[in-house]
Amino acid sequence: MNKQILLLSALALFFAVGCGADKNSNDACLYETTMNLDKGNYDAVLASSCADSMQKGAAHFGKAGYDVKDVINRFSEAKTTTNDLDTYMNALTGKVTENTLTNLDSAKTEYSTIPSTSTHYKDAKFYISLVDAVKSLSLIKIVTDSTGLGSLMSGCDKNANGVPDDADATACALQTITSTPCGSGITKINDVSPLTFATKTATYRGLDFTVTGTGPTTASCPANYKKLLFPQGAGWAAAVTSNPTDGMCVGSDGLQWPCPIEQGGVPLDLVTAIDQSITSAISSMGQALPAGTATDVQQSITDIKTQACGTDLTCTSADIASYLQTL
């Protein structure tokens, strides 16, 4: 009976809007907002006077380049694949830009406004979990995708270790933090510190790597891979950098480097951001599902935490470096 009532109400709304009802009415606004969301007109949803936080959260998630159904399907599929990181880095996560990360943050902000008393609360927590999990993967993708085209260069494996060279270079930057030797064939050809940028506040350390060997390569494989670190306590931390296709930044050394992403004048810490996102994803999923419930999506998100950060409580540079070597 309830489903029949909802169907009749929806049909009434459809005919009312379609047959010349007041286009400024709230019903007309709600209908238009729903249609815009379905059609992917996300800016129109965000500009709507009647869009609620659930709709705005979905619009920001869409603007980030993700579809809820696709994300759920990919997480479910990961349980049947032998390399879930490869699935995430190529099938799920496409081109990631600074705007991608901004929209993911905005989506979480909107979903987080849903109070615990709302009938949408558990749905909001479920979506927050998806957003956070996707953000953790997007952070890895944006610093690893050396060409900025949206896919890892699987045909570039000069050192023939079965890992794309761009993933090797990112792992090497993380290993530099812990003074761990990089893999065979990976050489640091430049180490610039201090390194500053006219449009950025912080001071950085620029690392430039090259990969050599007799493994697979093509003319499109980059000659070198540039990564940024920044001072943290007595050591260094890996900086999140923008997509190369968004443009490069000229450093104080006169050379071009990937642009660091800063929030409030502070560098975005790659490892900490990944850790916080995936930990929040697990927590939110736990609040979204009934106690004792287990799903493929929930297990996949938990696996990301275990594989990327180990079985302890906190991600480290060494953990993420090891994770990248599983590609």
Image (tube, helix red, strand yellow):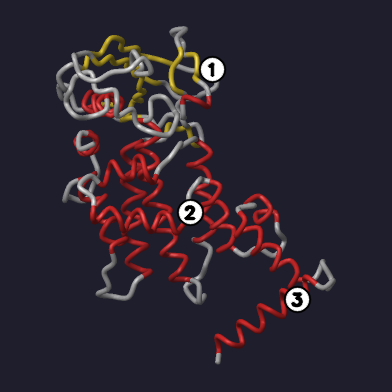
Q: Which residue is mark 2?
A: 67
Q: Specify the label residue 165 is tagged with.
A: none
In this view, 156 is above or below 17: above
Q: 306 or 10, which lies in front?
A: 10
Task: Give x and y (percent) for residue 33.
Answer: 67, 62
Q: Amino acid at mark 3?
A: Phe
Mark 2 falls on what kind of element?
loop
**Rendered view: 119 above or below 219:** below
Please state which of the two labelled residues, at mark 1 or mark 3, is closer to the viewer: 3
The reply to whether callout 1 and callout 3 are in contact (CB within 8 Å) is no
Report crowding for label 3: few under 14, some 14 to 19, many 20 or more residues within 10 A (C-alpha): few
Q: Which residue is mark 1?
A: 198
Q: Which residue was labeled with disc 3? A: 15
In the image, 19: left or right of 249?
Answer: right
Give the CA separation, mark 1 to mark 2: 37 Å
Where residue 178 sits: x, y (%)? 19, 27
Residue type at the position of mark 1:
Ala
